[in-house]
Amino acid sequence: MKRASLDRHTPYFEMLEALGQPGCAVCRLGARAVTRYLNSLSYETVNDVDLRATIREALGLCNHHAWQFVTETRELLGTAIIYRDLIRTLQRRTREQPSQSALIPRGGCVTCAALRTAITDGAELLAASWPDPALREAAAASDGLCWNHLVAVLSASRAAARRRDVVAVQRAAWDRRIARARREGQPHLLLEALASAPGVIGARAQPSANAPPASGDADLAEDAPEVKLGHCPVCAAVADRLAHRRPEIAVGASCPAHAWLSASRLSAVDVDSLVGRLKDLDRRLVSLIEKDSDGPALLRWTRRYRRGWEWVSETVAEADCSACREQRDQEIALIARAGPSTLCVPHLQLAALHHPDVDALMFQTRRAWRAIEVQLDEYIRKHDYRFNHEPLGEEKEAPSWAVELVAGLDGVR
Ligand SMILES: [Zn+2]
Ligand SMILES: [Zn+2]
Ligand SMILES: [Zn+2]
Ligand SMILES: [Zn+2]
């Protein structure tokens, strides 16, 4: 195949270009896919009937993508239309069903799904095009992949020799990263290598509501802060805690979302622990590849078939994040003692399990939903060309208010 004759916007050229940019190329392409997806959601596909139904069933985008949708699009009309739909869906569902089942999303975040597809495509392209000299050269000169995406490329590579070569190229790239992180006091370079770039963080794993509580956290005794009428006090408490209490930077024991939430407080001192973690993963990887490729080929294939590449799922995105666990305990403690107040949907889900009088909370929340719906109607009306000379009033904030009550405050999930 003659690459040079291909359109420069093919995935191959996008990959080549991404490898020449700072950071993990697959992260970069994943983040780009998310931006494109959210753009198309707000300007083109907002009226697609099937897509809107899928989003409704899932009760919206995950917290991370919902807020990206708000902050990255200039025009919030698409957000207003989609979230009015969701507010109406919630009103209808909670009228027709008990709150426990009404508040459970059916299906996941559509943007997370787009992101997963982009990452799989990128990893498969890298694995398949590895013999291409231009691509391999670009990879060898790049910043290297993050751990998650290295694993994705390796699992898409069939031949053991190719996997070894990928790992060798990767190790050199990580060594350059480590040297730069030390020289410039930039622990973020290593955090990206371990936890992927912040632009590819999607839905955080929901901590199980029934897991046993963590033991003796004094902060759990605090009450929720005062919030404006119609806003979720539990979200406010969580946001407050995230802003003032540095979660343990235990990369490997934190989900990527929590790792990045505390990244602003990473210091040059943390470089050493991050390096240690990266080296440890590298060692584990090498031994897994060796284990996977020794013995007669037939045996290897049978074994691989049976095991289903279980090491592939070993990532630093630990499902059992201690910060998630602590946060869940704090949320449950706050919810159990909450007076009648408005809650966001994620916290209503917990309240349905842990609050003695969830109906009182629902009553308050429904009032907020009705107010939001009225404001969103007004917001959407004033974006009609016939009325867009009318200045926006309080409904200016309605799209973000709606997102806050459907997805929770930015960063709480
Ligand atoms: Zn990556
Ligand atoms: Zn998402
Ligand atoms: Zn909340
Ligand atoms: Zn977490």
Image (spheres, rainbow, N blue to C red):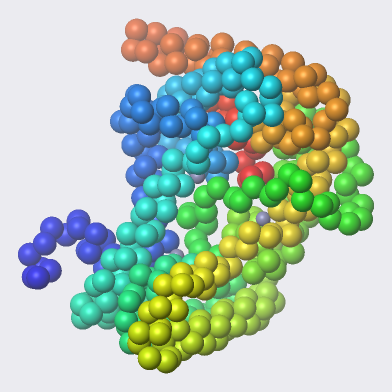
Residue 84 rendering spot, x and y as whole percentages:
51, 20
Q: Quadrant of residue 304?
A: bottom left
In the displayed structure image, the side of residue 413 where residue 43 appears, left or right: left
Q: Dividing the image into 4 quarters, which one contains the C terminus?
A: top right
Return the residue nearer the eye: 189 or 94. 94
Q: Residue at x 48, y 54 (%)?
A: 199
Q: Residue at x 37, y 53 (%)?
A: 117
Asked if residue 215 can be seen in this view, the reply is yes
Residue 319 rendering spot, x and y as whole percentages:
63, 59
Residue 273 rendering spot, x and y as whole percentages:
67, 78
In the displayed structure image, the side of residue 61 where residue 255 appears, left or right: right
Q: Residue at x 40, y 40 (%)?
A: 38
Return the residue nearer the eye: 250 or 229. 250
In the displayed structure image, the side of residue 373 where residue 236 appears, left or right: right
- Quick check: 28 above or below 233? below
How many marks are shown on the rendered structure? 0
Q: Residue furthest bottom?
A: 295
Q: Quadrant of residue 162?
A: bottom left
Asked if residue 170 can be seen in this view, the reply is no
Q: Residue at x 92, y 44 (%)?
A: 221
Q: Dividing the image into 4 quarters, which one contains the N terminus?
A: bottom left
Return the residue nearer the eye: 74 or 17. 17
- Quick check: 32 above or below 20? above
Residue 188 rendering spot, x and y as whole percentages:
57, 68
Q: Residue furthest top?
A: 386
- Quick check: 17 above or below 164? above
Return the residue nearer the eye: 276 or 93. 93
In the displayed structure image, the side of residue 380 where residue 272 appears, left or right: right
